[in-house]
Image (cartoon, rainbow, N blue to C red):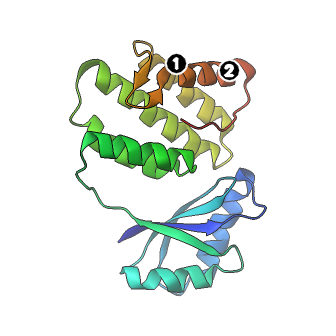
Amino acid sequence: MRYMLFLQNSFYQPKDSLWLKNKARELSSTSGIAIRDARVSRFHIEYDISIPDYDKIVKVAHMFRDIGDYSSSYHVIEKRREKLEAISEAKSYFNEEKYWIAHEILESIWKESTGVEKELIGGIILICAAYVHYQKAEEEICISILGRALKKLSNARGKYYDIDVDKIKDRICDIIANGKVTVFRI
């Protein structure tokens, strides 16, 4: 079973993500837990892990207590959501800097979308993907993906549900022009 495990972040930076992944692998080496990846936001350290069952998530969090205190977890399963619910949930996760989850949730409605809406959702998904790379200190990759996202958003304007598309496009243009990634909310 796949989970995102979130630990509170006191001082780690995205540049520490590889060290954090290796440290987690070291701490869990005899437990049968697979550590896929580690990402670092301002608020949390995100581990992409596989464990046999959810009951072990507390045990895993306890193993990692020297890295950070347990914050939350998310079971990664494909779930059908109504569009408004999915957009609202994805926006909330994006604003919590849980970009990977936001990406996954949006993909579920992107698959059923068409036309300009499909391009717009695809653009937001790419923004999420870009920030996943940013959380692993891969700024050049992040900026490159943001450029692709901007192209997908080129025909979108105004508000999409309660997401200000014009504001997002302006922020991305600033990031690309400055070559410096900054975190923003949608």
Say whether residue 116 is left or right of residue 39.
left
Q: Quadrant of residue 23?
A: bottom right
In the rendered image, residue 32, in percent from the top left (x then y), is placed at 46, 82
At 50% from the left and 40% from the top, the residue drawn is 128
At 51% from the left and 34% from the top, the residue drawn is 127
Q: Quadrant of the N terminus?
A: bottom left
Judge whether residue 173 can be spotted in this image: yes
At 65% from the left and 75% from the top, the residue drawn is 69
Q: For the view shown, which residue lies furthest in the right direction?
A: 11
The type of residue carrying mark 1 is: Asp
Point out which mark residue 174 bears: 2
Point out which mark residue 166 bears: 1
The type of residue carrying mark 2 is: Asp
Judge whether residue 28 can be spotted in this image: no
Q: For the view shown, which residue lies furthest in the top direction?
A: 155
The correct choice, above or below, for 170 with respect to 20 in the image is: above
Mark sitting earlier along the chain (2/1): 1
